[in-house]
Image (tube, rainbow, N blue to C red):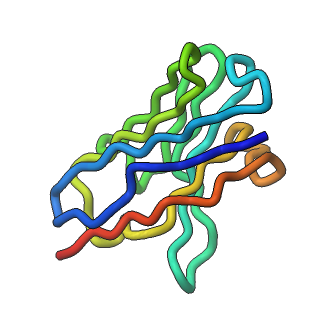
Amino acid sequence: VQLVESGGGLVRFGGSLRLSCAASGFMFDIAAMTWARRTPGKALEWVSSIYVDGSTKYADSIKGRFSISRDNAKNIVYLEMNSLKPEDTAVYYCATGGYSDYTEGFWGEGTQVTVSS
């Protein structure tokens, strides 16, 4: 199993980024996928999950600003991030699994997102 995140970077307050997670080595189209983030000194925070049926869940902290989607033909899960705030600064990871079990799944190496004020 391999998960490779990309799309992170430095963006100003209010800006946007789209993260991608390219997946391989497993049956992507029957796997729930999750984005989570970690800020130095803080615990891991679940951000969003997308399920096989296309249903989605979002953390309250990002609801209305972030959007998760998946392309089963390309084995990619996306996280569209809008209206970014400095508190969104973190390393963003994608993982296999949904909200209840992503911590037990496979993880990528992460991509850094930095939002300047």
Name the residue located 38 percent from the left edge and 64 percent from the top edge.
113
In the rendered image, the residue lying farthest to the bottom is: 41
The answer to which image quadrant residue 30 occupies is top right
x and y percent of residue 43 in the render? 62, 74
Count of picture labels: 0
Q: Is residue 65 above or below residue 77?
A: below
Q: Nearer the viewer, residue 2 or 29?
A: 2
Q: Is residue 39 above or below residue 52?
A: below
Q: Which quarter shows the C terminus?
A: bottom left
Q: Is residue 77 left or right of residue 79?
A: right
x and y percent of residue 55 in the render? 55, 21
Q: Is residue 116 left or right of residue 31?
A: left
Name the residue located 54 percent from the left edge and 20 percent from the top edge.
74
The answer to which image quadrant residue 110 occupies is bottom right
Q: Is residue 32 left or right of residue 110?
A: right
x and y percent of residue 25 in the render? 78, 32
Q: Nearer the viewer, residue 46 or 95?
A: 95
Q: Is residue 84 above or below residue 22?
A: below
Name the residue located 69 percent from the left edge and 30 percent from the top edge.
32
Q: Which quarter shows the N terminus?
A: top right
Name the residue located 33 percent from the left edge and 69 percent from the top edge.
114
The answer to which image quadrant residue 27 occupies is top right
x and y percent of residue 46 in the render? 59, 54
Q: Is residue 105 above or below residue 50?
A: below
